[in-house]
Image: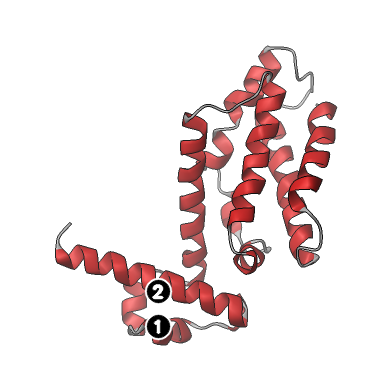
Amino acid sequence: MNSRTLQAVKTKQRIYENSIKLFKKNGFDKVTIQDIAKASGVSVGSFYNYFTSKQDILYDRFIIADEVFREFSSAGIKGSTYKDKISNYMLFYIDFVLTQPYDFTKVLYNNDSKMFLRKGRAMQTLLDPLIQGAIDNGEIRSEMSVDEINEFLFQAMRGLIFHWCLNDGGFDLKERAVKYLSLYISAL
């Protein structure tokens, strides 16, 4: 990497980090591009060299999440049955959320985060072979398709995470996820 490229990477990271700090402190809706640029020591024009909008900053987290899930899946998901593997996959999702700053999670889990709906994201597609394996192995007898089961599980976990955020983290998210996943997966 040459010095110009390295500087660009550092600038983008500084903008990202300052944005997250401002979102946590003031709330996503109250932070302007001008606020972010000022906190990052760059011009508004420079901000737009790295991000197209405030929402674009959040999308970077989705890209990172997809990479984390690729690594997790490539290492082999533990479980003696496909249902166990599905459960462990979804619990990894909860663990990933819990590694993020809580205030950031509150910013991300809102009705404007359309990246949750984007088709073809690694986080969701990597679950498909586990669901198909469970169907092929007779562990899941649902009339739902692989895509429908995938969507059902992610909707359930996102809803739980959203509810956790609405309750200001007032319950043990992992404990509740374990309990609910057991019910969801056994119903399939």
The residue that label 2 is drawn on is: 15
Q: Determine the image quadrant of residue 80.
A: top right
Q: Which residue is mark 1?
A: 37
Q: Is residue 165 left or right of residue 108?
A: right
Label 2, residues with CA under 10 Å away: few <14, some 14-19, many ≥20: many
* Residue 50 in view, yes or no: no
Quick check: 50 above or below 160? below
- Tell me which residue sits at (70%, 26%) in the image: 84
Task: Give the vertical position of 53 relative to 188 (above or below).
Answer: below
Is 140 drawn above or below residue 108 in the view shown?
above
Q: What amino acid type should be assigned to the residue bearing mark 2?
A: Ile
Residue 115 makes an appearance in the image: yes
The kind of secondary structure element at disc 1 is: helix
Do tag 1 and tag 2 residues touch (Cβ < 8 Å)? yes
Residue 129: % across, % down: 58, 24
Q: Secondary structure at mark 2?
A: helix
Choose the circle earlier in sequence order: 1 or 2.
2
Q: Give how far across and how far down residue 87 sits, in percent.
A: 70, 32
- The amino acid beneath tag 1 is Ala
Picture residue at 81% right of the left edge, 63% below the top: 170
Residue drawn at 44 percent across, 86 percent down: 34
Q: Position of residue 73 (x, y in %)?
A: 51, 32
